[in-house]
Image (cartoon, grey):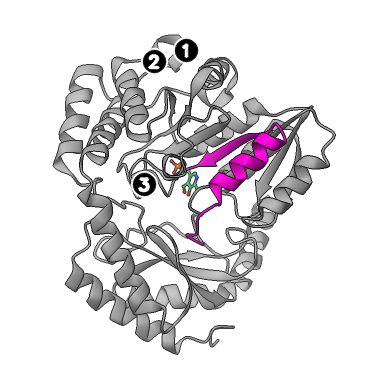
Amino acid sequence: MGRWIADRARVRAARGGSRATRVAAGLYDLASNDYLGLARDPRLAAAAAAAEAEFGTSAAASRVVVGTLAVHEELEAALCRLTRREHALAFSSGYAANLGLLASLGGPGTLMVLDEHAHASLIDGARLSRSGTRTAAHNSCDDVARLLAGRREPRAVVAVESVYSVLGDAAPLARLAEVCAEHDAVLVVDEAHSIGVHGAGSVHAAGLAGDPRVVVTATLSKALGSQGGAVLGAGDFGAALRDHLVNTARTFVFDTGLAPGAAAAAAEAARIAAADGSLPDRLAARSRQIVAALAPVAELDVGCGAVHSARIGSAAAAADAAGQLRRLGIAAGCFRPPSVPDGVSRLRFTARAAQDRHELGRALAVVADVLTTIDRQEPAA
Ligand SMILES: Cc1ncc(COP(=O)(O)O)c(C=O)c1O
């Protein structure tokens, strides 16, 4: 086994695909998902501390044993108010929410159609579900319609992200919802990169918050500055789905409930995000600043929210560019296959409401220099 692991590491390194855990303290942050700057907000820290004082540091059991606390119910209500949905179920992470939801919706008799850029947690959920799974071309409603029309399975689920985590672009939600309605399919929308960034989220913006056929998944670890995930539904189907998940989602039933501090911090963040419309505006201004600085010097996938990615090419070149930036004091996301199914490795830059305009400007000047000079194919030996 030891030799096999060492061989795998050598193959990864040769492809420029090695990853590592590193403390990023001291680097200018162009990589994190703390989009609204709430992860360091004293109001969240105070809410977490109060919940820990009241409930302890752990839920100490599964939600279906004795791990459901008042703070979980407050969180679920706050998420419903923020997203204008009626039913919510909190999970211990966004990953667990996607795994639990798709595994519980699927099985023999269900076809899962996933956008080709869908997040790993949606892919893994579809795999776990043992459903027939098909991949649709990115953001192609025609392809989704074709796959649904040709299915043999009586049930179908289409899973997309409202804002894609690497490309940063938006899914055509209104049209996808129509296609799903025409073909009697449920539309699962992962709003990880939209809730908070776009206020109540893209599903609400598309006029779909009340649509029972649309199921939303959320992470509490990005704009909401905490940890955890949720599934949000509407109408009778949303209520039945919540009950179905409480009974069948293995990542809910067999997992300790979300820690009280994380639940309380996320609930506070949801309240702040619902009340303070200036945060998305500040974020949007920083986002425009990133695009203005980098679009002239890079092949930029310009996002609709906080995420923008520069196409680099080979995995090795992307890793090399990220390393150069790190040595210059800047943290950027480095996305290589399999995170990028089209095989184009990218550096990802994220906007945050808390970024100072002048500091961001200085960091972007350094990034622009590096992007102008890098070798987009292979780094020098
Ligand atoms: C689109 C998407 N869905 C789900 C997740 C998982 O969320 P969490 O970090 O809360 O597990 C992520 C996080 O990277 C994501 O980008």
Which residue is labeled 3 in the image?
222
> Is-magenta flag for residue 181?
yes
Residue 64: image tag? 1
Please give left or right for residue 358 compared with residue 240 in the image: left
Residue 32 picture quarter: bottom left
Q: Nearer the viewer, residue 173 or 312?
A: 173
Q: CA distance from mark 3 to mark 1?
A: 26 Å
> Is-magenta flag for residue 192?
no
| Ligand 1 within 8 Å, label 3 CB | yes
Q: Nearer the viewer, residue 248 or 209?
A: 209
Residue 352 picture quarter: bottom left
Q: CA distance from mark 2 to mark 3?
A: 24 Å
Q: CA distance from mark 2 to mark 1?
A: 7 Å
Which residue is labeled 2 in the image?
67
Alpha-carbon neighbours of circle 1 within 10 Å: few (<14), some, or many (≥20)?
some
Residue that appears at 44% across and 89% down: 373
Q: Tell me which amino acid carries mark 3.
A: Lys
The reply to whether dot 2 and dot 1 touch (C-beta < 8 Å) is yes
